[in-house]
DNA sequence: GTCTATAATTTGATAGAC
DNA sequence: GTCTATCAAATTATAGAC
């Protein structure tokens, strides 16, 4: 991947995390990446929508690996795993000034009714995350999806409250009765 | 509440559910409500942001009552309650053509990094929902928040997949070990 | 591949007649 | 309270020099 492409994706990612997909303009992306409009359209002829798809695909993989690593690091105890993920998410949100730590959920909600290719890219990421998490949880795909959904919802609640506590509360609730240590 | 105000709120609600807050223009709201720009600014001098706050406050109350009624109707069995809520949500999403059944979560995510008054209105709604649900669940505020977060996340997953199944899967997972019938 | 200039449209919002 | 006309700014996208 070229340096220019990387800078565009990183800038778009950061802006989507703060303002969402529709709330971010192409001008903001060029300003933050330091590259002019022409370069963005050279690397992404499909314009903003193609940038969005690339952000979802690239960072969907990155965050999937990160969360999975955090889950595995927590060991065998399922309750401890859950607590570790949500407590970690709370810390990240608090430390980051209550910016969305991941752009996927926001892009998904904004694109669901408007852009088929963006929505499909988001669905694909959710499927990969769910399948990967299900492996850790002894094939329990239902619980894996519940975990991801609760994480996405928790990000929303934590951001508008400007507090990591909702995420920690959700982690406590989900760990309950799941072998929490 | 005047008829004009009601029509504006309903139009904005419907559009937010389909396209989100930033994805909806004032022109779309006037077209759908059948009222001109001047009327919108007469009833909402604060413009689009004030319309957004009013939508969140009004429909936050409406949907809070609806979900609470559904929860109570399911009876004493906590697992059955949870299943009823998520199965019901899945049906609503499927029947509605995979439009968001509630605009709050989307507005919350889009406003969190941009509009203080909108984010505060969303936080207020989440607090009311959580407190009301906690009463049903014997004061378990953690679990009430987890339920709401999972519902919000489930809406996102269901919409991009164009299927109610993610919501049903999440309901099964959360009901597990909670006295499901 | 990078950059500037600009086109065509849409945005939220205002003014003022009725 | 309703409605039309309009503004200034921002939007995505394109053309073409370098």
Image (cartoon, coloured by chain):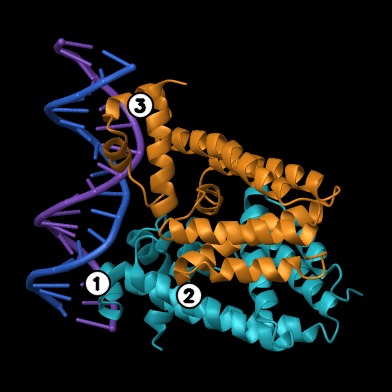
Chain colours: A cyan, B orange, C purple, D blue
Residue B22 left/right relative to A100: left
**Residue A10: x percent and y percent?**
47, 73
Question: Where does label 3 land, which residue?
Answer: B41
Alpha-carbon distance for marks 1 and 2?
30 Å
Sort mark 2 into few (<14), some (14-19) or many (20+) by Cα contacts within 10 Å: many
Q: Residue at x 58, y 44 (%)?
A: B119
Quadrant of the image occupied by residue B165: bottom right
Label 2 element class? helix
**Residue A95: x percent and y percent?**
70, 62
Quadrant of the image occupied by residue A155: bottom right
Question: Where does label 1 land, which residue?
Answer: A38
Label 1 element class? helix
Chain under label 2? A
Single out the mark in the foreground, 1 or 3.
Answer: 3
Badge 1 and badge 3 in a common chain? no
Chain under label 1? A
Single out the mark in the foreground, 1 or 2.
Answer: 2
Alpha-carbon distance for marks 1 and 3?
39 Å
Whether residue A8 can be seen here = no
Question: Where does label 2 land, which residue?
Answer: A123
């Amino acid at each position: 991947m070229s340096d220019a492409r990387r800078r565009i994706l990183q800038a778009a990612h950061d802006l989507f995390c703060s303002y969402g997909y529709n709330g971010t303009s192409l001008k903001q992306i060029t300003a933050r990446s330091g590259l002019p409009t022409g370069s963005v359209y050279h690397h992404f002829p499909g314009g903003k929508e193609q940038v969005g798809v690339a952000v979802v695909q690239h960072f969907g993989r990155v965050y999937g690996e990160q969360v999975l690593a955090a889950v595995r690091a927590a060991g065998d105890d399922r309750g401890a795993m859950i607590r570790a993920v949500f407590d970690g998410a709370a810390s990240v949100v608090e430390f980051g000034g209550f910016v969305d730590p991941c752009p996927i959920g926001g892009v998904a909600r904004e694109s669901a009714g408007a852009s088929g290719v963006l929505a499909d890219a988001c669905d694909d990421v959710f499927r990969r995350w769910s399948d990967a998490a299900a492996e850790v949880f002894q094939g329990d795909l239902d619980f894996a999806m519940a975990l991801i959904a609760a994480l996405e919802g928790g990000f929303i609640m934590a951001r508008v409250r400007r507090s990591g506590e909702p995420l920690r509360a959700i982690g406590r609730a989900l760990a309950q009765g799941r072998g929490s240590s």
